[in-house]
Amino acid sequence: MPHRTIPLPEGSLLAAIDLGSNSFHLIVGRVEHGEIRPVQTLSEKVQLGAGLIDSKLSTEAINRGLDCLARFGQMLDSVEPSRVRVVGTNALRQAKNRREFTEPAEKLLGVPVDVVYGREEARLVYLGVAHTLADDEQSRLVVDIGGGSTEFIVGQRFEPIRLESLQLGCVSYAQRFFPAGELSKNNYNAAYDQALVEVSHIRSQYHSGQWAEAVGSSGTLQAIETLVQMEGWRETGIDRKALDKLRKRLLKFDHADAIDLPGLSDKRRQVIAAGVAITSAIFDGLNIDVMRTSNGALREGVIYDLLGRLSHEDVRERSINAMVARYHANETYARVVGERVSWLARSVAGPWGFTERDIELLTWAGRCHEIGTAISQKHFNRHSAYLLQNTDLPGFSQGEQEVMATLVRGQRGKIRPELFEMIPESQRQKLSRLMVLLRLAVILKWVEALETLPDCSVSASADTLELTLPSDWRTAHPLTDWELRQGKNGVAKLGIRLELG
């Protein structure tokens, strides 16, 4: 199966980078007794989200981000690339030109940049927070206010129960409601009212009757707690009275540049009013009285998720199993196609340049190749692709889901130019090769289980794939032989010549 079960050696180094809309965060940690001990942490206020104009990142914002990653990259020299994960959040989710940032970023760091959906971001945030709290049965609401989105999670111990991501963040709200840093009662009330409307959409499942404790896990909430402490309004945490007092103090200033409060850093000055407005709306909308804060956040969640992938459990495997079960796919065919396409890919991994990540995604695509039959047998590959692209799949990035969806869409039928429109140009040749193998695996699913296939071999060169099967076996399986021969045309459209020996 794609996931591994061998524990990482004690002392192994792992690293995670959180490409947030406001700040970029790096953590390098060492594995000790199944836990992560931080070795190095870095943060820089990049404000990628502030450079998001008409859903496109500005050149200046892209350059700020890449300059930061060039500095972060020096800290990764001692960490194996397979033990590094880089995750992008709301600003990159929204940016139509995100590849102008992600592709040079990948070259700088030598690892993929995974842009994750909002609910996947929420799951990772919860995982990071859960490792900083007591391991008890108490249910919790975790709130993470970012630069462009806010994540809400209700969970227990290490398992999230509900996940949501809303489009409200301190950078986007600062730009929208406090233009050029102007502070006024009207501006503040407009930000609060809009945030309250957004929060009302999730009130029924996230209000105080659904959890026992509220925890905040972002720089914004930690900054608010610091301001509250410095004023002497509370020793720890945040409550409604303190928020109201802070609102009044902020509105004594006419401009963000003029804000002078003990404990407020320069980098927070431009976004603190928006952060307080959003936080107040969350408290009122979800009936929160008191919230504590946690140092755990997305970067910690990413590194613990990576530890799970590399040692004891890959949550993506659970997601794929759930997809197969949810849509009542034939589990035998799902398993057989997954096994066969994995065998094909590993047989030609060298000449075709497949990585372990490529083979994992191809195998999972094979397992889900016919989930679309739950909608209709006609064009089931299109339905399968739609489900893979649009379902919340814990553990997967947006790009990974797009790759699997494209592979499944191309498992049969004509190869149309628009098939690869979601895939960067630099990845299309590799994806075409993976798609060839999935087409073959689907054809071969109608014969015996993999372990009873006859002696056969597969080899590849730059533009050729040779599959050798005994002639008497092909004679005994005329339908499979005919489909293999017919399949040459489709494979040729993918730039590969299929030779049958």
Image: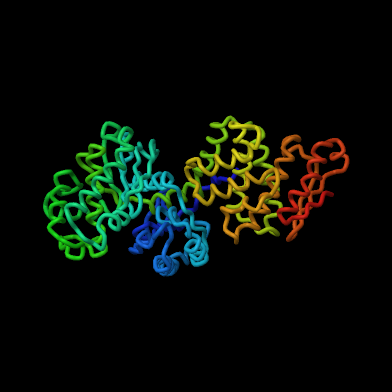
Q: Please give the name of the residue rendered at 52% of the width and 52% of the height, measured from the top-left corner.
A: 399
Colour setup of the view? rainbow
Q: Nearer the viewer, residue 494 or 233?
A: 494
Percent across and percent down for residue 68 are 40, 67
Tell me: 255 left or right of 392. Answer: left
Percent across and percent down for residue 22 are 34, 59
Q: Nearer the viewer, residue 383 or 30?
A: 383
Q: Nearer the viewer, residue 83 or 165?
A: 165
Tell me: 55 left or right of 281. Answer: right
Tell me: 135 left or right of 78. Answer: left
Percent across and percent down for residue 471 are 87, 43
**Residue 131 visible in the shown view:** no
Q: Please give the name of the residue rendered at 61% of the width and 56% of the height, measured from the top-left corner.
A: 355
**Residue 38 visible in the shown view:** yes
- In the picture shown, does residue 153 fall above or below 58? above
Percent across and percent down for residue 287 are 23, 37
Tell me: 309 left or right of 154. Answer: right
Q: Nearer the viewer, residue 485 or 437?
A: 485
Q: Please give the name of the residue rendered at 30% of the width and 39% of the height, measured from the top-left corner.
A: 141
Q: Quadrant of residue 123?
A: top left
Q: Quadrant of the N terminus?
A: top right
- In the picture shown, does residue 259 fall above or below 167? below
Q: How many marks?
A: 0
